[in-house]
Amino acid sequence: MDNALKILILACIGGIIGYITNVVAIKLIFRPIEPIRIPIINKEIIGLIPKRKAEIATNIGEVIQNEFLSLDEILENLITEEDKENVIEYIKTKIKLIVNEKIGFAPGPLKSIIQGYVSDAIEAEIRQSIDDLSEEIIIKANKRINIQQMVETKINELDLYELEEIILRIAKQELKHIEILGFVLGFVIGIVQGLIIIFM
C-alpha cells in the first residue's frame, strides 16, 4: 500500500476517533441523568451536571448576586429623583386645588401667599418622607430578598432534560466547534502516527 494512502487512512481514523470522543464527552456532561450502577466494579455513573446540579445552582446564584445583580443598586434605582419630583408635583397640585376650594373667598394675593407657604412646607416634609420610606424599603427588602437563593431555587427546580436543552441551545455553536476540533486534532495525530510507522 502506498505510504501516502496509509497516512491518509490513519489520519481519517484518528479524525473520526477524535470527533466521536468529543461528541461522547459532551453527551457525558448531561447523561446519564439518572445514576447507572455498574455491578462488576460497583460504581455509579451519572452525568456531570446531574451530579453537581445543586453545587452549580449555588455557584451561579452567588456569581449573579455578587457580580451582576446587586440588590442595593436595584433598590436604590427603584425610586429615582424623577419619581420623587413627580410625586411632589402631584401633591403640590392637589394642595393648590384644596387651598382654592377651602379659601376661595380670600383675595388672590393672600391665596397665593398661603399656597406658596403650604407648598414649600409640605414639599420639604414629603421629600424627607420619601427618602425615609426609600431607606425603610431598602432595609426591609435586604432582609427579605435573597437573589442568590432565588436563582438557586429556580435552577434546582428546572427539569434536567429542560436544563440540558437550554444549555445546548445557548452553547450549540461552541459545542459544535469542540466536536470539529476533536476531528482536526485526531486527524493531525493520525498523520503523526502514520509518519512514525513509516519512518521507524
Image: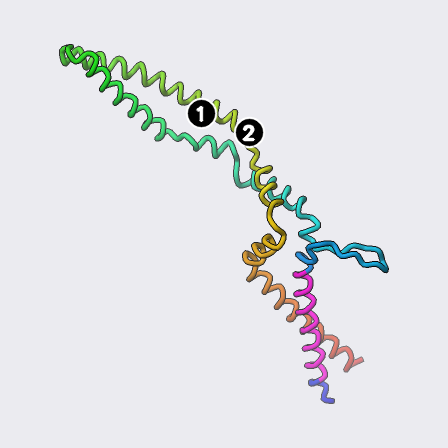
Classify the position of the C terminus by image quarter: bottom right
Classify the position of the N terminus by image quarter: bottom right
Q: Is residue 35 left or right of residue 154?
A: right
Q: Is residue 111 magenta?
A: no
* Residue named by callout 1: 134
Q: Is residue 158 left or right of residue 188?
A: left
- Is any part of residue 33 visible from this angle? yes
Q: Quadrant of residue 176?
A: bottom right
Q: Nearer the viewer, residue 170 or 154?
A: 154
What is the x, y in percent for residue 19? 66, 69
What is the x, y in percent for residue 119? 27, 17
* Residue named by callout 2: 144
Q: Label 2 sits on what residue type?
A: Arg
What residue is shown at x 19% (from left), y 15% (from top)?
Answer: 112
98 w.r.t. 76: above or below: above
- At mark 1, the secondary structure is helix
- Find the magenta span and give its range: 6-27
Q: Quadrant of residue 91?
A: top left
What is the x, y in percent for residue 123? 32, 18
